[in-house]
């Protein structure tokens, strides 16, 4: 039981600072060559496999993996620097994002030697992309109530069930599926297991779920008695919940949980500088102070992860603050920029439109803010 | 820097400030100064107790967390710092700093000071340190508390002394040239850093008290903590408190390491802690119910400090403007990461 959240500040090393310079030079070059246009929420919605491969070639994917698996033996804090530079630039990183963020650490930790060989070097090259099958039609925030079942059959597992809101399943090379192998939904956290299913696969149907902006980033993935090999079980049978919880620490703790609308904020900051409007300047200063603090918090969480101090509660708390900041950026720019958002527009108009249409998701994805607050309340010992 | 030393200081200062009873301020001040805790972070050659800014922040944090009315921020953080920077020694007794610059002139080799100076805790002080402008010189000067200046007493929202000293040609007891960079802006920044640490500590006190209260207090046949609405409030409070703590600690670390961007860190920290004070005090009072509004409850001593300290040394609007001005010359993202480009 704690009475406050211990989150000491972290100071980046000189090596991390030099790495930042390298990433900035690379991104400047890419921007100058016109290979991408900065976009909001690009980590979730703008996939460019060629860009991912170029990052892989520079050693900026799978950075913390051991070199034996194609990784680069870098620290999580060096990865943090690369991550935040890519997010600040609004670079098209969605293709490899999930594979790099949570599947690489998860497979390294729980995977069999053959699973490690099979997936990790390809992830690090920026060539192997993952989707995550957690949510279901009847299990959103309440993940423990998943109904997808995996039954042991001759020579493997037979999976039946439906996953929804599966980001990038339509281009992913594999999906990790949380399914019940033992017991019933009444057993809650017990009896769940994780499987890696290569895509496309017989018996697995992928249908788009279009969002309010008409775009296709999410999918419904239907497993109709899909049979997968024996060794597609990830980790331990029945330990799925524990494995997923560890994965969520990676999913929830990254700087993308406050930086999704930073590309908009950067363009607006430039706009404000040119306009010289005092009231807009003051609000820009306010958002800057909040972003500065969120960045320090995000850095502290990354340091906690690096030192194997479980940051579950701190990560939930930072995501609660960060995701509300993302939406506040959009609202502030809308109120003060004196422009109307335009779908597919250029510059501020287009960035604003895109950020606006994505904003309901900020406080839902990766655990709704109400769930995150429950996690924090439990950490404070009042739940 | 030295975690063991900081833990020791925290324990010692907590033990001193924990003791209740008559004349809490007087006794606490006496014991703190006898132990040298009031001048931690001031170099020994300047008459201080030595130690770094991180150690000093611990003392200020504990005093603010306990809401004990002792001027540790004003003595070590401000007055001791001014004196040490100018190569002067800290006089015995309580020495506090003026927030304003005095006008000086020399008469028969004596530096005489005039002006209306805001001096927190002046009524209790043995000496007052002030910056002074004398012809083309920037000076740091010491005035004895009994030098005959007019004292106008006033209090902030928490009842802490925020006095006004009216000088009319008062003779300085000591003075020295201010080193380059030591000016009104630097003093404001230094005070803002101290208040950031204090605000974060007071916010933590609200969280600790609220958590205890909702766990112990029962209504409708169950502890308040069993209500989801209460849990959500408490989690939002914890988030805000953590943000304030991280920003204050990160700013202390930036100043301690003399980072090129320490000024940005302090501005962001004071803005964050000042802006956060509202929600922290509001949720704190809401969770404590009417009990927390009574002067007999400890909560008011903390929330009134949050409301007072957020205004001192620039409130959030001041520092938001400061950051916006910094953005005139620098791009947004490099400013955030502390890089030149």
Image (tube, grey):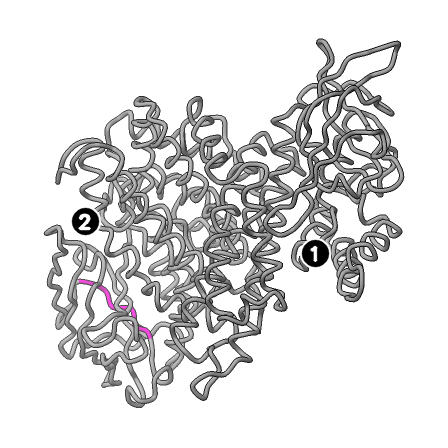
Asked if residue A53 is among those painted magenta in the image, a careful observer would answer no
Front-lying residue, B298 or A291: B298
The picture places residue A202, in percent across and down from the top left corner, at 13, 70
For mark 2, name the chain: A
| Image spot of residue B252 (x, y percent) | 63, 42
Q: Mark 1 highlights which residue?
A: B62
Q: Residues within 10 Å of mark 1 (few under 14, many from 20)?
A: many
Say which residue appears at 12% left-offset and 68% top-offset.
A205
Q: Residue at x 84, y 10 (%)?
A: B107
Residue A221: quarter of image? bottom left
Chain letter of disc 1? B
Q: Magenta segment, principal secondary structure?
A: strand
Residue at 19 percent of width and 33 percent of height: A339
Residue drawn at the location 32% of the way across and 27% of the way down: A272
Q: Can residue A67 be seen here?
A: no
**A100, above or below B262, in the image:** below
Q: Residues within 10 Å of mark 2 (few under 14, many from 20)?
A: some
Q: Is residue A60 left or right of residue B238?
A: left
Report the disc number at residue A357. 2
Check the image and report above or below for A247 versus A139.
above
Q: Position of residue A363 (x, y in %)?
A: 30, 58
> How many numbered badges does the structure rendering display?
2
Marks 2/1 same chain: no
Q: Are marks 2 and 1 in contact (CB under 8 Å)?
A: no
- Whether residue A294 is visible, yes or no, is yes
First to last magenta residue range: A194-199
Label 2 element class: helix
Of residues A89 and A371, which is closer to you in this image? A371
Measured Cα–Cα span from mark 2 to mark 1: 46 Å
Considering depth in this image, is B251 or A209 the residue closer to the camera?
B251
Which quarter of the rendered picture does the C terminus of chain B lie within?
A: top left
């Amino acid at each position: 039981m704690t009475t406050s959240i211990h989150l000491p500040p972290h100071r980046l090393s000189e090596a991390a600072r030099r790495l930042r310079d390298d990433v900035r030079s690379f991104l400047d070059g890419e921007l100058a060559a016109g290979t991408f246009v900065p976009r909001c929420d690009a980590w979730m919605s703008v996939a460019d496999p060629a860009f991912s491969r170029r990052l892989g070639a520079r050693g900026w994917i799978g950075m913390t993996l051991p070199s034996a698996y194609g990784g680069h033996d870098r620290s999580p804090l060096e990865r943090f620097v690369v991550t935040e530079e890519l997010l600040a630039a609004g670079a098209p990183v969605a293709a490899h994002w999930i594979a790099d963020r949570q599947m690489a650490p998860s497979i390294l930790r729980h995977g069999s030697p053959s699973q490690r060989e099979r997936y990790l070097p390809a992830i690090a090259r920026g060539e192997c992309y993952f989707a995550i099958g957690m949510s279901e039609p009847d299990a959103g925030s309440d993940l423990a109530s998943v109904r997808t079942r995996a039954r042991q059959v001759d020579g493997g597992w037979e999976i039946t069930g439906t996953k929804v809101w599966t980001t990038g399943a339509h281009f992913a090379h594999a999906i990790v599926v949380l399914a019940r192998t033992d017991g019933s939904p009444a057993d809650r956290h017990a009896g769940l297991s994780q499987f890696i299913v290569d895509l496309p696969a017989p018996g697995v149907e992928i249908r788009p779920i279009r969002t309010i902006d008409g775009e296709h980033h999410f999918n419904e993935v239907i497993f109709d008695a899909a049979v997968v090999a024996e060794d597609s079980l990830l980790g331990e049978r029945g330990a799925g919940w524990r494995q997923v919880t560890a994965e969520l620490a990676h999913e929830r703790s990254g700087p993308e949980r406050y930086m999704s609308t930073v590309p908009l904020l950067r363009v607006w900051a430039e706009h404000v500088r040119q306009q010289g409007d005092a009231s807009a300047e003051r609000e820009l200063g306010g958002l800057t102070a909040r972003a500065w603090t969120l960045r320090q918090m995000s850095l502290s969480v990354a340091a906690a992860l690096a030192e194997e101090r479980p940051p579950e509660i701190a990560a939930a708390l930072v995501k609660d603050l960060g995701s509300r900041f993302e939406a506040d950026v959009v609202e502030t720019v809308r109120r003060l920029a004196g422009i109307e958002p335009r779908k597919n527009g250029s510059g501020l108009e287009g960035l604003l439109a895109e950020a606006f249409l994505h904003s309901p998701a900020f406080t839902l994805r990766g655990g709704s803010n109400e769930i995150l607050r429950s996690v924090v309340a439990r950490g404070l010992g009042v739940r | 820097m030295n975690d063991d030393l900081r833990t020791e200081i925290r324990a010692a200062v907590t033990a001193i400030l924990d003791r209740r009873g008559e004349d809490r301020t007087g006794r606490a001040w006496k014991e703190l100064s006898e132990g040298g805790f009031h001048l931690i972070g001031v170099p020994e050659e300047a008459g201080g107790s030595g130690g770094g800014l991180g150690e000093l922040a611990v003392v200020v944090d504990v005093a603010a967390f306990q809401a004990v009315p002792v001027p540790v921020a004003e003595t070590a953080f401000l007055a001791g710092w001014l004196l040490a920077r100018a190569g002067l020694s800290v006089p015995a007794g309580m020495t506090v700093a003026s927030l304003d610059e005095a006008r000086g002139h020399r008469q028969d080799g004596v530096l005489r000071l005039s002006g209306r100076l805001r001096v927190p805790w002046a009524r209790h002080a043995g000496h007052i340190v002030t910056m002074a402008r004398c012809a083309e010189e920037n000076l740091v000067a010491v005035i004895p508390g009994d030098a005959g200046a007019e004292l106008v007493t006033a209090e902030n929202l928490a009842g802490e002394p925020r006095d006004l000293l009216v000088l009319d040609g008062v003779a300085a007891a000591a003075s020295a040239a201010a080193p380059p960079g030591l000016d009104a802006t630097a003093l404001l920044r230094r005070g803002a850093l101290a208040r950031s640490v204090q605000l974060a500590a007071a916010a933590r006190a609200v969280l600790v008290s609220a958590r205890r209260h909702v766990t112990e207090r029962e209504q409708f046949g169950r502890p308040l903590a069993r209500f989801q609405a209460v849990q959500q409030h408490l989690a939002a409070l914890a988030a805000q408190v953590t943000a304030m703590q991280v920003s204050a600690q990160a700013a202390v670390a930036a100043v301690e390491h003399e980072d090129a961007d320490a000024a940005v860190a302090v501005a962001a920290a004071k803005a964050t802690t000042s802006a956060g004070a509202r929600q922290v005090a509001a949720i704190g009072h809401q969770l404590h119910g009417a009990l927390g509004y009574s002067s007999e409850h400890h909560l008011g001593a903390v929330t009134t400090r949050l409301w007072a300290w957020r205004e001192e040394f620039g409130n959030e609007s001041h520092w938001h403007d400061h950051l916006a001005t910094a953005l005139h010359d620098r791009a947004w993202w490099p400013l955030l990461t502390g890089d030149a480009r």
